[in-house]
Amino acid sequence: MRITLLGTGTSVGIPMIGCACETCKSTDPRDKRLRTACHIEAGNLSIIIDTGPDFRQQMLRANVRHLDAVLWTHHHFDHIMGLDDLRPYFFDCKAPIPCFAHPKSANVLRSIFPYIWGKRKAYPGTLKLNPADTPFGIKSRYDKPDTINVTPIEILHGRMPINGYRIGNFAYLTDVSHIPEAEYRKLKNLDLLVLNALRPTKHPRHFSINEAKNVAMRIRANQTVFVHMSHQVLHSRESTLLTGSMALGYDGMVLETT
Ligand SMILES: [Zn+2]
Ligand SMILES: [Zn+2]
């Protein structure tokens, strides 16, 4: 399985409009962060987690030519607002795209994009929206034999329940500020964990870097990579404070796992 981090920034992206701080002015490419999303390639399967405002640019930059499924972590704008740009994936393949989201986020997505889910056929294809609170399978839209199983992990973003996902020995958790005890059981024996770490200081709805490090030490994946970082994180400075199995992610980072 090959994971590409398409974006590693917090909601405003880095650089932030109007900001002249050290990180926003940095010329280090690792300090240029589109909104957080990732691409998973498993055999012939191509899966996207989150479709934020930078989705189109991310698909072009990573050259994602085919798509078998979309997973949404939650319905905040920085994770969904590129949704309409899924349309080109119908141009060469008319099969519906299965989409998965936490049941509450699925309801919000239906109300934000009524023309996509409604009966008026204003959308050129079908996005099949599935509320995901139990494990499910994904198969190819292109008649390939590949299939893969996905386990939703219910985590808290402030007080809002949202989804993380586990696929094989890879787990992806973003925008989390608390992991319920029962969900830790689904995060055992991970090879790769992608986890949000907003900034050095605390935040009510996101793990700080220290909180993320503590969670990573408890989960003990072979490798943990942090994403969804604000402009308070200058890559060259914060990355030197991490050791061993933990690292800061950056846009375009490619990770191999099982
Ligand atoms: Zn800044
Ligand atoms: Zn959010």
Image (tube, rainbow, N blue to C red):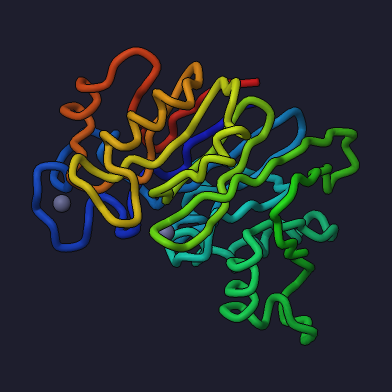
Q: Is residue 193 left or right of residue 41?
A: left
Residue at 69% of width from left, 76% of height from top?
A: 116
Image quadrant in which you'd find residue 158: bottom left
Answer with the quarter of the image where residue 166 lies.
top right
Using the image as rendered, state which of residue 9 and residue 211 is in the foreground.
211
175 sits left or right of 130 in the view: left
Left of 217 or right of it: where is 75? right
Which residue occupies the foreground of this view, 166 or 143?
166
Residue at the outermost front position: 181
Percent of width and height locating residue 175: 42, 51
Query: Of 205 and 16, which appears nearest the observer?
Result: 205
* Residue for point 70% across, 56% down: 132
- From this viewpoint, which residue is outermost toward the bottom? 120
> Can you give x and y, in whole percent of width and height, for residue 48 in the image?
61, 47
Identify whether 29 is placed above or below 69.
Answer: above
Task: Name the quarter where the N terminus is drawn.
Answer: top right
Instruction: Say which residue appears at 83% left-offset and 48% top-offset.
Output: 141
- The answer to which image quadrant residue 212 occupies is top left
Q: Position of residue 214 (x, y in %)?
A: 34, 30
> In this rendering, is residue 245 above or below 147?
above
Residue at screen point 59% across, 29% down: 170
Image coordinates for residue 219, horizontal then vertical, percent? 48, 26
Q: Is residue 158 above or below residue 62?
A: below
Number of numbered discs present? 0
Q: Give the side of residue 32 with respect to residue 149, left or right.
A: left
Q: Quadrant of the C terminus?
A: top right
